[in-house]
Image (cartoon, rainbow, N blue to C red):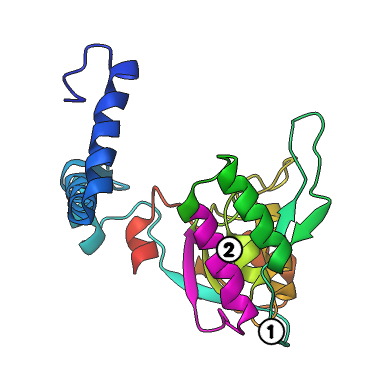
Amino acid sequence: KCRGCKNWRFGYASHVKALVRQGAYAPAAALGSAKAGLAYLYEAFEFVDKDGAATPFGQALSSGATVSGRTLQSAVVKGAPAGGAKSYDVPYDGGWHPSTPKPPVATMTGAALKSQLERWVSGGVVERDAADAIQWTSDFFAGGGSLSGAHFVLIGAGSAMGPCAKLLQLGANVVAIDIPGSWGKGGPRPASGLWKRLFGMAQASPGGSLTVPVTKGFKQTSNVDALAEAAGCNLMEEPREIAA
């Protein structure tokens, strides 16, 4: 139906909403539509290798198709000692605007967080399931819960709205996928700066770690500048190498 819309830019939304609505009624329908979408992607999308040969994406992941020709390995940045129990704090009373950023001036936890969640629900700011999820997380850590044995793979780990900072703050192990640190070298905003920021978070993490892709043969080093330039990968050109 989306493909049949003459005014696709505005007409597709109603069909997507209908699909989401069906998934909300039946978990099996939601899972089925997601699987169907992925199956279409693997069959219809093409990966073009360094010689210009196009291969269906699914086949490319299991073949030798490549653009970069390199093999990846992992490097790990470990955090500080784990320490004691952690609390789940939610930053509060902040805001952002391109010209007038306002960092949060407070954090909420425990009973204060629970009360604020109820106010948000009653005021229509968040839905009940969102509040319940935040409360569950708060209770998990208040009860001595830990993420020390949990691993999270983040694509676009350095994104401003991503969970990398919070996960590392809570002592999780993060596998970070993001752009090569060598991009933009010598320019005003080298990509290595992104990795240095992530490394700083990882080193301060209580018991957590950050695993990053580097070219095979790279020797693990404590030199942050060298590791920041070596870290990263190109998701569009190296999907097979990353998956391996």
> Which mark lies nearer to you, 2 or 1?
1
Element carrying mark 2: loop
Q: Residue 208: x percent and y percent?
A: 62, 78
Whether residue 11 sits left or right of residue 69 in the image: it is left
| Outermost front residue | 122
Could you tell me which residue is drawn at 54 percent across and 55 percent down?
131
Point out the tag, 2 or 1, that comes first from the N-terminus: 1
Image position, residue 13 (x, y; %) = 32, 25
Extreme top residue here?
6
Task: Classify the position of the N terminus by image quarter.
Answer: top left
Counting the numbered discs, the total is 2
Question: Is residue 177 at all visible to an observer of this figure?
Answer: no
Amino acid type at mark 2: Ala
Magenta stretch contains residue 220: no
Which region shows up in magenta?
130-154
Q: Quadrant of the C terminus?
A: bottom left
Label number found at residue 85: 1
Q: Which amino acid does label 1 sit on?
A: Ala
Identify which residue, 19 or 77, lies in the foreground: 19
Q: Where is residue 107 in the image (x, y as percent from the top left)?
A: 77, 59
